[in-house]
Amino acid sequence: MSTAFVTIDPDLCNKDGICAAECPVKILGFPKKGEMPALVPGGEALCIRCGHCVSVCPTAAIRLNFLAPEDCIPVDRELLPGEKATKHLLATRRSIRNYKKESVDKARLEELLQTASCAPTGHNSRCVQWQVIYDTDEVRRLTAMVADWMRYMIKEQPAMAKAFHLEETVAGFDLGLDVICRDAPHIVIACAHKAAPTAAIDCATALAYLEVAAPSMGLGTCWAGFFNIAATFWPPLKEALALPKGVNNHGAVLVGTPRFRYHRIPPREAAAITWK
């Protein structure tokens, strides 16, 4: 059976119904028991282009006009970490605040961002965009703008400035101690168009993927909280970033090569769980 949108090889299809069951928007149906799946009327317009049907088919029988089985990377079960390894991986992740004074190769950063872009997005919108402040001198210039925002906050909103210890932060910055961007060589910003309804959580999820993947590449990260707030509200910094029209910043992380290696995992409090 084939249409311009979906093609199913009758010699490969075993009529197990997995593709129809896994389709998030249920555009593949079974007219009769034991028959091959069929695209429901209007199904092409409803498809969210997630590729689940192609990915899950055990016999590689189904293809879409934008995705074929041979376009996909085969799952290598040998490369997947087990439960113990996964728990250890996540527990060892640390926020890195001391970086070597060296740039990360652009190809490595691009590889990291490609991995982070595998993160799920609402309705498979793939709305996350990246802006990399790569030049270290530019990172320093933008960091100084964050310090200017802090000075404004100290004057205009002293209560909030006190709550976030902005006066101490600026004092340290003026003495050459950068606790704003931690002398990191690079900043990665996750942003998305304002029309994307799940933009904020999609960007946060992608940044979480980035943080988990970075150590495997010998890199360290830390959420750039002060930078992110200033990039959202401080006009000079927003102008300097020059994001495309309609695109908003939703998170920023520092990226670089860690100066030090951690040797132990500190214990955490038990998870706060409510069962209902």
Image (cartoon, grey):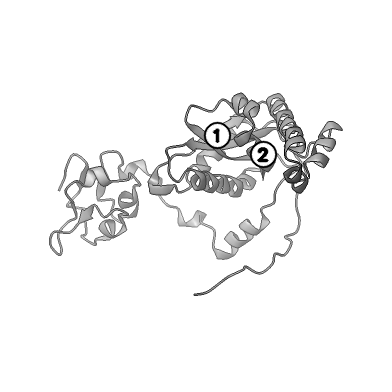
The residue at 25%/51% (across/down) is 61
Expressed as whole percent of the image width and height from the top left, the position of residue 204 reads 55, 46
Count of numbered circles on the image: 2
Q: Nearer the viewer, residue 225 or 115?
A: 225
Disc 2 marks a residue whose amino acid type is Leu
Q: Is residue 99 left or right of residue 20?
A: right
Q: Which residue is mark 1?
A: 110
Residue at 72% from the left image edge and 60% from the top image edge:
265
Left or right for 225, reference 151: left
Residue lying farthest bottom? 276
| As drawn, 239 above or below 212 | above
Is residue 134 at all visible to an observer of this figure? no
Q: Find residue 262 and name its label.
A: none
Name the kind of residue labelled 1 in the image. Answer: Glu
Marks 1 and 2: CB-CB under 8 Å?
A: no
Quadrant position of residue 127: top left
- Which mark sits nearer the N-terminus, 1 or 2? 1
- Secondary structure type for disc 2: strand
| Mark 2 neighbour density, 10 Å: few (under 14) some (14–19) many (20 or more) | many
Indicate the secondary structure of the residue bearing disc 1.
helix
Where residue 34 appears, as percent x and y from the top left, is 15, 63
Residue carrying label 2: 254
Q: CA distance from mark 1 to mark 2?
A: 15 Å
Q: Position of residue 166 (x, y in %)?
A: 77, 41
Residue 51 visible in the picture: yes
Q: Name the residue nearer the viewer: 103 or 40.
A: 40
* Residue 142, above or below 127: above
The answer to whether residue 196 is left or right of residue 235 is left
- For this orientation, the residue located farthest to the right is 175
